[in-house]
Amino acid sequence: NKPAGIAVHGGSGLSFGVIEAFRQLRPDAKELELVHRLDRDTSGLLMIAKKRSMLRHLHEALRGDGVDKRYMALV
């Protein structure tokens, strides 16, 4: 569960994010990749694939009807 205020990856002036932290913690897992992104100010579930084959599978599920996404906005 990614808290708000944390970037999922480096870029746009940031050199470090969640995926870079995971890669440092798991140097043996060479294929760690973000399945999707969340904006820095958004909290929520963040999926990370450990293998390229699972990354492809999850991308297909997200594009089709294989995942039920639900959003809640607090205003």
Image: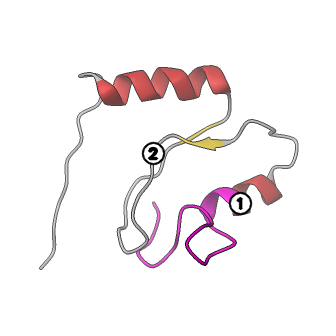
Instruction: Quadrant for the N terminus, please.
Output: bottom left
Residue ranking furthest to the left: 75
Q: Which residue is mark 2?
A: 36
Q: Residue flagged by tag 2: what amino acid is it?
A: His
Q: Nearer the viewer, residue 4 or 7?
A: 7
User: Residue 15: which quarter of the image?
Assistant: bottom right
Q: Nearer the viewer, residue 11 or 52?
A: 11
- Prevailing secondary structure class for the magenta stretch in the rendered image: loop
Is 47 located above or below residue 2 in the figure?
above
Q: Residue at x 52, y 69 (%)?
A: 7
Is residue 47 found left or right of 41 in the rendered image? Answer: right
Image x and y of residue 69, in percent: 24, 41
Is residue 67 found left or right of 71 in the rendered image? Answer: right
Q: Secondary structure at mark 2?
A: loop
Q: Residue at x 40, y 22 (%)?
A: 60
Within the magenta stretch, is there residue 19?
yes
Q: Residue flagged by tag 1: what amino acid is it?
A: Glu
Rounded to the nearest angstrom, the CA distance separating label 1 from label 2 is 15 Å
Crowd class of label 1 (few under 14; some 14 to 19; many from 20; radius 10 Å): some
Q: Nearer the viewer, residue 22 or 34?
A: 34
Residue ranking furthest to the right: 28
Instruction: Quadrant for the C terminus, please.
Output: bottom left
Q: Residue at x 17, y 61 (%)?
A: 72
Q: Which residue is mark 1?
A: 20
Image x and y of residue 5, in percent: 45, 79
Within the magenta stretch, is there residue 30?
no
Is 41 located above or below residue 34 in the figure?
below
- The disc at residue 54 is none
Crowd class of label 2 (few under 14; some 14 to 19; many from 20; radius 10 Å): some
Segment colored magenta: 1-21
Q: Secondary structure at mark 1?
A: helix
